[in-house]
Amino acid sequence: MKVFGERTRAAVSVLAAGTLMAALAACTPAAPGPAPSGSSSTAAAVPSSASASSSPSATASASPSAEPGTSATVGALVPGFPQTLLPVMPGARVVSSSFDKTTVPATVALVGSIPGPAAAVLAYYTAALEAQGFKAVPGETVGTVPSKDFLRGDNETVNISVMETSGVSTFTIGANVAAESVK
């Protein structure tokens, strides 16, 4: 029975990865926009495995199930992305972003990459979020991954996780915030 459970988890993982790949394949090319400041020197320092951002940015196409006000983009910030809430760290390259203002609370996500240590990424975003009234929740890791949670009020949350490989930190930020926080 234990082997069957492991196979089931593996099958679910493969299915999830396939779904993600299908979603990325459904992206249609968008007009390339200006790169975030400082990203031109950053691109040369990023390993070639992160080549998805070197191609033109792509925006997820609308599907019958897509809600108005929901969007995701690869290689750039999605239109309307709340940069005041989640600023792009200076020198970072945007890998992907998403924004769904149709949910309550609204959801915002950012994946970025920057040469440097994970601790620097956490320090930057800790300062940015605390300046907006978020409070850090105790805990600095999930397993061995640097990760930090923040809370503002009773229902606004932000999580930051950072993977560091060969001197490059790739960070994922997810936020669930009140609609007025993303205007």
Image: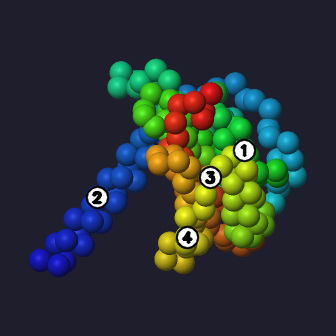
Q: Which residue is mark 3?
A: 134
Decide if residue 40 is on the left or right side of residue 4. Answer: right
Placement of 56 over or under 14, stated as above or below: above
The mark that comes first in sequence, 2 or 1, is: 2
Real-space Cα separation, disc 3 to disc 4, in angstroms = 13 Å
- Quadrant of the image occupied by residue 136: bottom right
Taking the spot 79% from the left edge, 38% from the top edge, the residue there is 35
Taking the spot 50% from the left edge, 72% from the top edge, the residue there is 142
Q: Which residue is mark 1?
A: 87
Real-space Cα separation, disc 1 to disc 4, in angstroms = 23 Å
Q: Which residue is mark 2?
A: 12
**Residue at the extreme left:** 1
Is the C-beta separation of discs 1 and 4 under 8 Å?
no
Placement of 70 over or under 172, stated as above or below: above
Q: Which residue is mark 4?
A: 138
Decide if residue 4 is on the left or right side of residue 40. Answer: left
Q: Of circles 3 and 2, which is in front?
A: 3
Residue 137 placement (x, y as % from top left): 55, 64
Q: What's the residue type where badge 2 is placed?
A: Val
Q: What's the residue type where badge 1 is placed?
A: Pro
